């Protein structure tokens, strides 16, 4: 039967006629009729901008859904999709008359602009968030929405110009990409062409005129080529269908405007489609055509062996045909052709009358649509109320995804441009992402921040004992990966925080036992309430965290709480204050460290942070060990008693020719000659190597170096040069 075109008039009888071709149960037809009778009452008297009855729009939605061969529940919901929004029909009434399933579908399609939002952009984003999540839970929601949007676009001429532009932009950004991802090409093509007509009417008209001018010439060329191919296939006794394929305006526009092609350079305007019975026949016909006509190098694509993520399958080739014209020829089976036209709608598990040939067929379809789950995942991961972030992430990560990367098993993973092996790993599975330690792309070990390209085969190396690093957030591309990394780090930080508190309690308990104090009293949080502020704590757990982190010692805490244990530090504090009265007095140690007003105390460079000239430093007065000099940001002195911290300075006149030890750690790709390259760079900057400790873990090299340098400036120069070595991931200065 011939389906109605956009300019035709459609009636409810037309809907029933199409439904009768694939819906056999009378109760299913009765359900559709019941929905029709209901809308004729509820929408009675309502008009569209065109002046026609509103029910015409609803009948068209049902008709489009029937041409997609959706089930009776979907068609009934399509007829009813505006009653809750426009006719003030309650949820209870809908459930009573049509059941929970249809009511849920109608709710999924219903807009939410009656809710309070800050601005129109919030409403726009939240509406789409709602639709995407409903779609992920039930694909029929978006099928109804696509049918609704298609008819609205067909009648957009009755809207104001500003609304025409806004609706067309939204359709091109949201609905056309969804139709493409679902493989519903008939709807996608028409939506794109209609949008272009409103967004760039001049370009639309120019391309339309060019097509019209060449129509007769192209028709003659296609007819001759079709006749030639028919004769060729008949000679080989092939059973087939053949038809010409029109290039739609928007695809021509993209090639002319975006790829800067001239109209006469678009050789795929001439196209034929050969439809066969079996997959084997497709390859046989391809061989026959290539044997008879000269194929264009690099233009053959096998989407049968390697289907597109939207399940599209076909063989594509370009040949030089009759009269020297270049033709694109698509070769596919009847089933592939149906899928190419109607996409997932023709095979979805919700189509009530569909009988699958096997459970594997159903599983394959569900697997292909796994990306739908990203809608819900993103919604769960992005904080409530931030619909704009959700919408932007969805558009970038899913709708604009055009890099196709394969697993070693041949599974295709679709990613946005700029994605890395870490993005790929999280698309495979959250746990694969969490424990990724390396990547092999096309049989070569690569850094985990490598940008993947279409056709890459990527294998992720994992280690169950490893986890994401905050550095990953600097290069991951997808919102899904970014949010999962943040969640992991946040959870890990919480666990670490709890462990550190327990460590602090353990250290305090040990000090209490060492001093033979009452454990019950000195493990009671009430004992320390008045001392929280001294340690920058708000409660007992905060205090134990400071102790566990070794930003202060349990001994220091108890010295404050028990007065008779503070004598040494009281005397030391008085001594420092007295000596500091002489501001001009400055003593310098043999290490090149100057201390104002202090004499006779031993001065040492701390082993934990190994300060070097150029670092900001402070002195820490240690009982029985004199003054220990730390880097100002060394975690081991954070939270220390103010009375024990004193000012110290580098005396650059006394450190000429001196060298200082410093520890660094290098993390990089385990590759041949990595260590040789590091040693070469260190030699070039004239840095002495005192010790090397190198190890390898899951293809990742971990190299610890003790270096001898003159100052912080030389160390930074060294690190900058080391960072230029291929395969270096991270270089950090080690604080013990």
Image (tube, rainbow, N blue to C red):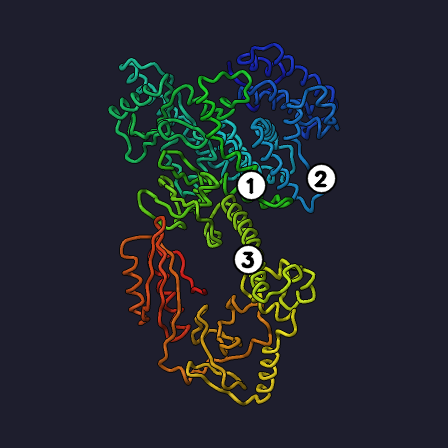
Residue 146 visible in image:
no
Mark found first going from the N terminus, 3 or 1: 1
The reply to whether dot 1 and dot 2 touch (C-beta < 8 Å) is no
Secondary structure beneath dot 2 equals loop
Mark seen at residue 378 = 1
**Residue at mark 3 to residue at mark 2: CA–CA distance:** 50 Å
Q: Position of residue 36 (x, y in %)?
A: 67, 18
Q: Is residue 405 visible?
A: yes
Crowding around mark 1 (Cα neighbors within 10 Å: few <14, some 14 to 19, many 20+) is: many
Residue at x 58%, y 35% (from the top left corner): 132
Tell me if 462 is positioned left or right of 157 in this view: left
- The x and y percentages for residue 365 are 47, 26
Q: Which residue is mark 2?
A: 115
Q: How many marks?
A: 3
Q: Disc 1 or 2, which lies upstream in sequence? A: 2
Q: Which mark is residue 363?
A: none
Q: Mark 3 highlights which residue?
A: 503
Q: Position of residue 369 (x, y in %)?
A: 49, 31
Percent coordinates x, y for residue 500 in the rendering: 55, 57
**Distance between mark 1 and mark 2 Cα atoms:** 22 Å
Rendered view: 203 above or below 630: above
* Quarter of the rendering occupied by the C terminus: bottom left
> Eyeballing the image, is 313 above or below 456?
above
Secondary structure at numbered mark 3: helix
């Amino acid at each position: 039967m011939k389906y109605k075109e956009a300019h035709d008039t459609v009636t409810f009888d037309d809907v029933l006629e199409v439904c009768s071709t694939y819906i056999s149960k009378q109760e299913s037809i009765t359900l559709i009729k019941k929905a029709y009778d209901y809308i004729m009452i509820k929408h009675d008297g309502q008009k569209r901008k065109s002046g026609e009855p509103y029910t015409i729009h609803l009948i068209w939605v049902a008709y489009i859904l029937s041409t997609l061969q959706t089930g009776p529940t979907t068609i009934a919901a399509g007829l009813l999709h505006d009653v809750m929004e426009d006719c003030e029909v309650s949820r209870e009434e809908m459930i009573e008359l049509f059941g929970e399933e249809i009511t849920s579908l109608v709710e999924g399609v219903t807009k939410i602009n009656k809710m309070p939002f800050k601005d129109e952009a919030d409403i726009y984003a939240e509406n789409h968030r709602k639709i995407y999540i409903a779609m992920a839970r039930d694909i029929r929601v978006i099928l109804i929405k696509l049918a609704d949007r298609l008819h609205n676009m067909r009648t957009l001429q009755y809207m104001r110009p500003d609304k025409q532009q806004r609706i067309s932009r939204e359709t091109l950004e949201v609905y056309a990409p969804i139709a493409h991802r679902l493989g519903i090409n008939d709807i996608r093509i028409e939506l794109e062409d209609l949008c272009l007509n409103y967004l760039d009417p001049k370009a639309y008209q120019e391309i339309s005129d060019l097509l019209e001018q060449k129509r007769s010439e192209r028709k003659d060329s296609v007819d001759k080529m079709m006749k030639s191919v028919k004769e060729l296939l008949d000679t080989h006794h092939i059973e087939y269908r053949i038809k010409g394929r029109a290039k739609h305006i928007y695809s021509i526009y993209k090639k002319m405007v975006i790829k800067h092609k001239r109209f006469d350079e678009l050789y795929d305007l001439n196209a034929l489609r050969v439809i066969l019975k079996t997959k084997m026949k497709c390859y046989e016909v391809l061989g026959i055509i290539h044997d008879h006509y000269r194929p264009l190098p690099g233009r053959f694509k096998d989407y049968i062996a390697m289907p597109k993520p939207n399940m599209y399958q076909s063989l594509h080739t370009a040949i030089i045909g009759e009269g020297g014209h270049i033709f694109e020829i698509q070769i596919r089976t009847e089933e592939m052709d149906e899928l190419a036209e109607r996409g997932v709608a023709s095979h979805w598990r919700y189509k009530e009358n569909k009988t699958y040939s096997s459970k594997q067929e159903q599983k394959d379809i569900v697997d292909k649509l796994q990306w739908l789950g990203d809608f819900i995942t993103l919604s769960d991961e992005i904080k409530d109320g931030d619909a704009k972030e959700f919408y932007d992430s969805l558009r970038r990560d899913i709708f604009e995804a055009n890099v196709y990367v394969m697993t070693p098993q041949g599974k295709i993973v679709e990613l946005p441009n700029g994605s890395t092996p870490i993005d790929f790993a999280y698309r495979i599975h959250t746990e694969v992402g969490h424990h990724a330690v390396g990547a092999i792309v096309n049989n070569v070990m690569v850094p985990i921040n490598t940008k993947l390209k279409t056709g890459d085969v990527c294998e992720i190396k994992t280690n169950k004992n490893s986890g994401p690093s905050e550095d990953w957030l600097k290069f991951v591309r997808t919102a899904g990966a970014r949010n999962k990394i943040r969640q992991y780090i946040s959870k890990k930080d919480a666990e670490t925080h709890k462990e550190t508190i327990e460590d602090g309690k353990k250290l305090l308990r040990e000090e209490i036992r060492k001093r033979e104090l009452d454990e019950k009293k000195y493990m009671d949080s009430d004992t320390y309430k008045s001392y929280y502020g001294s340690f920058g704590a708000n409660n007992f757990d905060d205090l134990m965290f400071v102790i566990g982190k070794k930003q202060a010692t349990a001994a220091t805490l108890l010295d404050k709480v028990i007065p008779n244990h503070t004598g040494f530090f009281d005397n030391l504090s008085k001594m420092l204050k007295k000596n500091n009265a002489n501001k001009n007095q400055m003593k310098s140690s043999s290490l090149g460290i100057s201390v104002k007003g202090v004499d006779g105390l031993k001065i040492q460079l701390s082993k934990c942070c190994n300060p070097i000239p150029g670092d900001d430093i402070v002195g820490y007065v240690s009982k029985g060990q004199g003054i220990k000099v730390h880097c100002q940001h060394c975690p081991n002195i954070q939270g220390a008693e103010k009375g024990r911290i004193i000012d110290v300075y580098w005396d650059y006149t006394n450190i000429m020719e001196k060298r200082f030890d410093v520890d660094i750690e290098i993390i990089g790709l385990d590759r041949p000659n990595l260590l040789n390259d590091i040693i070469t760079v260190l030699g070039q900057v004239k840095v002495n190597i005192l010790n090397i400790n190198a190890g390898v873990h899951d293809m990742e090299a971990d190299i610890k170096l003790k270096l001898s340098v003159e100052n912080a400036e030389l160390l930074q120069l060294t690190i900058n040069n080391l960072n230029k070595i291929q395969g270096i991931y991270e270089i950090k200065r080690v604080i013990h």
